[in-house]
Each structure stands twice: as structure tokens, then as C-alpha cells.
Image (cartoon, rainbow, N blue to C red):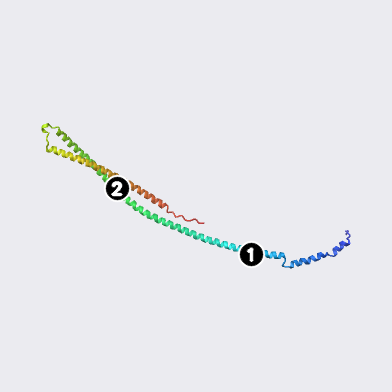
Amino acid sequence: RVVPALGFSSLQSRLIPHPFAVEAQPRATMAEEQPSSPVARDKATWQKHTDQTMMKSRKQIRDMLSRCRDNEIAEAANKAEAQEFAQGQALAAKKQVMVKAEHHEKMIDTSYTCIKEIEDASTQMEDSAVKLKHERFYGFAALQVCARRLDLREKRPSAETFADALGDALNREKTLLEAARSEIFNLEKEAKKIIDDLGAMRTYLSADTGERRLEMAHDSSSLKIVLLPDL
């Protein structure tokens, strides 16, 4: 192997180190030994700022968790209060509905009793109206007989046409039968009016009973207690 020849300058540069290179090594060692250099100060400042920021963040997190717990407690208290208020309102409404229902039940019972009495009275009045009609028919037949007898007496010969007790009795009977017939007519009209009034009253009581039962059913359906949903 052939080794190239080296000049004096090249050999000198290999054997004798450069003066600036000799001085660079102590300076680097001194830089590592000095703690108050700018880099070290920046690192300490950064570490201090980081610690302060972490402490501030932890404090904020603790405050947030504390506020969250306070909010949950307040929300639970509000929810319980709202449920208690709703239940109180529902119980008050139920009590009011029960009082109204009791009043309606009493009125319905009274109406039912009145309806039964009205039906009995209507039946009796209808029977009385039928009897009045029969009496009017009987009276009309007697009136026809009396009128026929008077007509026959008027056809007597002129020698026999004089006033006597029989003629007076027939005239009084006719007057009495006509007055009785007229009175029976009035009684029949009054009986018919009473029957109509009783029917109208029964219709009113039946409608009122139905309306009260419908109102009771509506009030009963409104007694559902709505609970607040869980959040």
C-alpha cells in the first residue's frame, strides 16, 4: 500500500491543535456550570408559570365540581318541592271534587224521589181525567134525555101547554146538567195542564240528573296526579 506524501503544513496541523479550538472547550464547560444563564432562568420561569397554571386549573375544577354539586342539590330540592306542591294541588282538587260529588249525589237522590212521586201523581191524575171524561159522557146522556123530554112536552096540544111541576123539574135538571158539564170540561182542562206540568218537571229533573252524572264523570277523570319526570 502506497502512503501519499504529506506536506509540512498538513503535518503541523495534525500535530499542533488550533488555538481557538483549545479555548472553546473550557468555555463550553463554564456555560454548563453557570446556573444563572438565560436558558436556566427561562426554564425556571416556565416551570413556575406551569405550576401556577396547574394550581389555578385545579382550583377552578374544584370550584366547578362544587357548583355542580350545589346545583344538583338545589335541583333535587326544587324537584321535591314541585312534586309536593303538585300532590298538594291534586289532593285539594280531589277534596273539592269529592265535595261536589257528594252534593250531586244528594241532588240526584232527591231528583229520583221526586221523579217517582211525579210519576205516581201523573198516573193518578190521568186516572182522574179518565173518570172526569166518563162522568161527562154520563152527564151528556142524561142531558140528551132531559132535552128530548122537553122537546116532547113542547109538542103537546095547546090545551095542555101550561107550566107545571114536571116542566119546572125538567128545566132545573137541564140547567144543572149543563152547569155540571161545563164544570167537568174545566176540570178536564185543569187535569190536562197538571199532567203536562208534571211531565215537563220530570223531563227537567231527568235532564238535570244526566248533566250532574256527566259532570261527576268529568271531574273524576280530572283527578289523575301527574308526577314530574326524573331529570
What is the three-letter code of the residue carrying label 1? Gln
The N terminus: image quadrant: bottom right
Marks 1 and 2: CB-CB under 8 Å? no
Q: Is residue 196 above or below residue 25?
A: above
Residue pointed to by mark 2: 118
Residue at (63% x, 64% y) in the render: 52
Left or right: 20 in relation to 116: right
- Find the distance from the CA under tag 1 to the CA under tag 2: 96 Å
In the image, which disc is placed on residue 52? Answer: 1
Identify the residue at the far left of this view: 159
Tell me the SS state at disc 2: helix
Provide residue 63's location: percent of width, then percent of height. 57, 63
Q: Quadrant of residue 175?
A: top left
What is the three-letter code of the residue carrying label 2? Ile
Left or right: 193 in relation to 80: left
Mark 1 vs mark 2: which is more N-terminal?
Answer: 1
Tell me the SS state at disc 1: helix
Left or right: 74 in relation to 46: left
Provide residue 120's location: percent of width, then percent of height. 28, 47
Q: Which of the pair 97/186 is nearer the observer? A: 186
